[in-house]
Amino acid sequence: MKFTLHFGNNTFPDLAGATRLARLAEAAGFDSVIAVDHVVYPDTYTSTYPYAASGRLPGDRTVSLPDPLIWMATAIAVTTRLRFMTGVIILPLRHPLVLAKQVATLDHMSGGRVELGIGVGWLKEEFEALGIPFEKRGKRSDEYVAAMRALWAKDGASFSGEFVNFHEVSSNPKPVRGSVPIVIGGHSQAAAKRAGRLGNGFFPSIGSQVDTFPLFDLVRHTAQASGRDPKAIEMMAGCPDALPKSGKDPKAAVEERRRRGIDRIILPVHAFLPDLEVGLSRFGETVIRQFA
């Protein structure tokens, strides 16, 4: 069982905070830290935020939300083992060749400690601000994944699609293991099916307002129907009963998740405040070491 801290970059948006979080997480035995993403925050929007009952983004336009890849690079530089994942980067808002270059570079420089969590996006007004069509964002995302993997796989790569076309181009450095793991985020059936078809992992947000466990079954079913090994797709889930101040037995809660086929537990880092060092260290000693 792996353990990951969520909301790293918006909880600790400054250099000192990011450095402290990364070092403490690594010392406590966490596998990874997640950085979230939005390019811009519209002053007004009618889109519904799907990960809170209010339907609204937390905070306001003044909240600092560093670019996830740049924030991850900062934290990578002060650690040696800790892994980092975008959770999730809004894939249709990025040019796939530029993103492939950035992610491969970060993976190369870190010794293979990067995972690319992707989502198709929900905030239509953000797409409009960037001049990118909101429609077909799912299909665009599928194509972007294929294009990035083609570019990572070899030099002289070519790709022909509806949204991306290139012929015999090369991008280096390559990812350490030939590709970067791509984790599909989202709480919908479409996201679960996407994970089954092409993902290395599936991460329905820990704040989603739906029962996510049927989605894990859908991932496995889709993978099998697509000729893939369902066990090769890492399943990630929150675990509220494992959090400090939950009043529950955290080890029992984690064990229940493991019995249900979960490979990685995602926990919000703010739940370990105000004393981050004590909170993370205690969790590492009482829970992480028991499941290592």
Image (tube, helix red, strand yellow):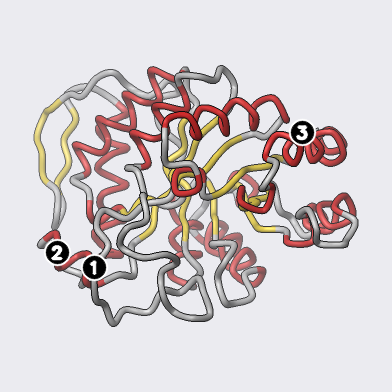
Q: Earlier along the polypeptide chain: callout 1 or callout 3?
A: 1
Number of marks in the rendered image: 3
User: Where does the image place residue 137, in percent across and percent down from the top left?
Assistant: 25, 65
Within 10 Å of the Cα at label 3, are there few (<14), some (14-19), or many (20+) other Cα atoms?
many
Of discs 2 and 3, which sits in the foreground? 3
Mark 1 falls on what kind of element?
loop
Residue at horizontal 45%, vertical 23%? 177
- Which residue corresponds to mark 2? 129
Q: Quick check: 191 above or below 102?
A: below
Type of the residue with mark 2:
Ala
Quadrant of the rendered image containing residue 279: top right
Depth order, front residue of 15/145? 15
Residues at marks 2 and 1, CA–CA distance in whole angstroms: 8 Å
Identify the residue at image location x=19%, y=36%.
98
User: Which numbered disc, 2 or 3, marks the residue that appears first in the sequence?
Assistant: 2
* Residue that carries the numbered disc 3 in the rendered image: 281
Image vertical order of residue 273 relative to residue 197, above or below: above
Q: Position of residue 50 (x, y in %)?
A: 45, 74
Viewer-closest of 200 and 272: 272
Q: What's the distance in space between the residues labelled 2 and 3, CA to CA?
A: 42 Å
Q: Quadrant of the N terminus?
A: top right
At label 1, the amino acid type is: Pro
Which residue: 50% across, 48% down? 11
Q: Mark 3: which amino acid? A: Ser
Q: Earlier in the sequence, mark 2 or mark 1?
A: 1
Q: Are marks 2 and 1 in contact (CB under 8 Å)?
A: yes
Q: Which mark is residue 42?
A: 1
Helix, strand or loop status at disc 3: helix
- Residue 285: mark in rendering: none
